[in-house]
Amino acid sequence: MRSMLVLSALGNLALSIATCPTGPVIKDGGFESGVTPPTSGGNSWIVDSFIGASTYSLTSPGSTNNGGQYAFTAILYPGPYSNGLSGDTLKQTLKTCAGHNYSITVDYKFDTAASGNCAVSIRYPYKTTTGSVTTGSGVAGGTAGNWYTTGSTFQAVSSADPFSIVFSCSNGANDRISVDNVKIAPYAGNAF
């Protein structure tokens, strides 16, 4: 009876491993396709949740931290009815494996000195809800136009976990915030 129980457990383990997606966890994390989202033809990024008169573009060059030719830039403009708020959200569905741990790193820069009261929030799965790490434009010792890196870890909830980068400002000014080198990889440590 014990051997049947062990074989049954091993059979279930093999089944769960086989159902994990293959390939990269995130697609075009360096924006090197040169294609502005949302698109078909290989780019899985979507931009939505616009606040104010905000828009976006790919800009060049990318991050000075081994970035490539392009970076994603949120161009944030408050609208006449947005009470000085501006923002948008860049998102993608990840190819993850439920119960597995992952690390996230993202390069970011606040392009203008006017970026006070702005933030970049990285949102990822966390148990039955969403976790996040937020970096404000008042980074200690930070300088507008310099690239910095932030990151976190998480445990995947499903094989298609949502991931987003939220750009927001509340200063009533025109702002530009860029991201590049969005990397998500398996993580051997504890993700909590």
Image (tube, rainbow, N blue to C red):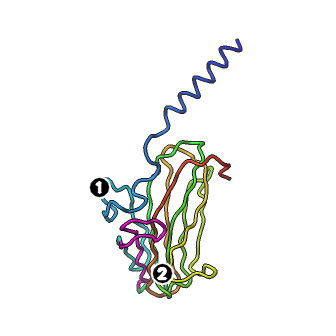
Q: Which residue is mark 1?
A: 40
> Is 9 placed above or below 127 here?
above
Residue 145 is tagged as 2
Q: Position of residue 161 (x, y in %)?
A: 51, 50
Tell me which secondary structure the magenta stretch mostly adopts.
Answer: loop
Which residue is located at x 46 percent, y 65 percent? 66
- Is residue 142 shown in magenta? no
Mark 2–mark 1 distance (CA, rounded to whole Å): 31 Å
Give residue 93's position: percent from left, percent from top.
45, 52
Tell me: residue 155, above or below residue 68.
above
Image spot of residue 129 (x, y percent) = 60, 54
Occupied quadrant, residue 74: bottom left
In this view, the residue farthest toward the top is 1
- Measuring 71% from the left and 14% from the top, which residue is drawn there? 2
**Is 81 positioned to the left or the right of 41 in the image?**
right
- Kind of element beneath mark 1: loop
Q: Is residue 56 above or below residue 77?
A: above
The secondary element bearing badge 2 is classed as loop
Q: 70 or 81, which is in the foreground?
A: 70
Q: Which residues are magenta?
A: 59-79
Q: Amino acid at mark 1?
A: Ser
Camera-side residue of 47 and 85: 47
For marks 2 and 1 on the same chain, the one whose residue lies earlier in the sequence: 1
Write the residue at 62% across / 20% down.
8
Q: Is residue 124 above or below residue 6?
A: below
